[in-house]
Image: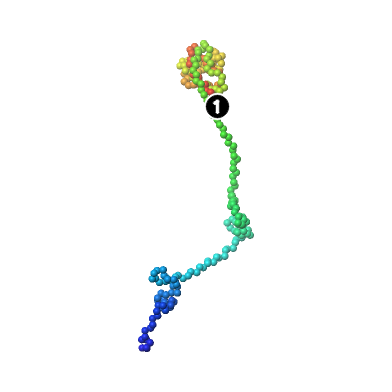
Amino acid sequence: MSRASGRRQRVPKAEEIKPGTPEGRQLGLSDRVQGHPSPIPGGRPHISNAPAVRHNVPTPPSDPEIGMGNAHGVQPGSHTNAERADAERGPNTVHHTMPRPRHHPQHERPAPIPVFVVQDAHNDVLRSAAPHNFTVPGNNADPVHICGQDAGRSEVMILNESTAQNIRIAQTPADLTNGGGALIPYPSNSYVKIKTQDHLYALSTSGTAATISVIQVFERDM
């Protein structure tokens, strides 16, 4: 056994141990230890991450423009797509979108039809009625005049109220002689409408008088 083997080896102090050495790695020392003290009271300085190096991604060159043999319905030509776009819309300008060709024929619009507002003429006409009651004498007396001429009258309504006597009407008194004129029998229970603007006379068909109701309908402009 040598003399040196019995001696104890000198243990280095912590201040003398350098980072990166085997002794330093055993103690946790590193070259990346920050030089600033730890923010925690009594703590040791932290080890920072390795600095990151930013790398730019290289941009590959663009594909060459296709000038001939285009698909998708594009007309072939010697110019490129960029040149065609500049030719259609112009550089640095704004244009409306070019309309696409229609594959079906356009239908012509029909010609407009003029429309006229037609107003009923009767809207400006006032209608009125004049009811009367007459005693028609027998055939041995003169006829009674039940209505005269009136251009504003549209019709005459006559009702025989008698239960046993017939009456006759005519335009003139002479038309009622010898049983002339038009007959309105007593069994009728509704008005007889006559569109006339002239005279009307009435006479009973027998010697007994009869009773009739007459309604004249007028239309006058307002």
User: Residue 23, percent across and down?
Assistant: 41, 78
- Residue position marked by numbered label 1 in the rendering: 222
Residue 95 visible in the snapshot: yes
Outermost residue, right direction? 78
How packed mark 1 is, by other alpha carbons closer than 10 Å (few <14, some 14-19, many 20 or more), is few
Q: Nearer the viewer, residue 62 or 163?
A: 62
> Vertically, is 12 above or below 57?
below
Q: Nearer the viewer, residue 126 or 40?
A: 40
* 172 relative to 211 in the view: left or right: right
User: Residue 56, percent across and down?
Assistant: 53, 67
Outermost residue, bottom direction? 2
Q: Nearer the viewer, residue 6 or 213?
A: 6
> Vertically, is 65 above or below 144?
below
Residue occupying image coordinates x 43% and y 77%:
18
What residue type is disc 1 on? Met
Residue occupying image coordinates x 54% and y 66%:
58
User: Residue 84, percent across and down?
Assistant: 61, 57
Quadrant including the C terminus: top right
Residue occupying image coordinates x 55% and y 65%:
59
Residue occupying image coordinates x 42% and y 75%:
29
* 103 relative to 20 in the view: left or right: right
Quadrant including the N terminus: bottom left
Residue 169 visible in the snapshot: no
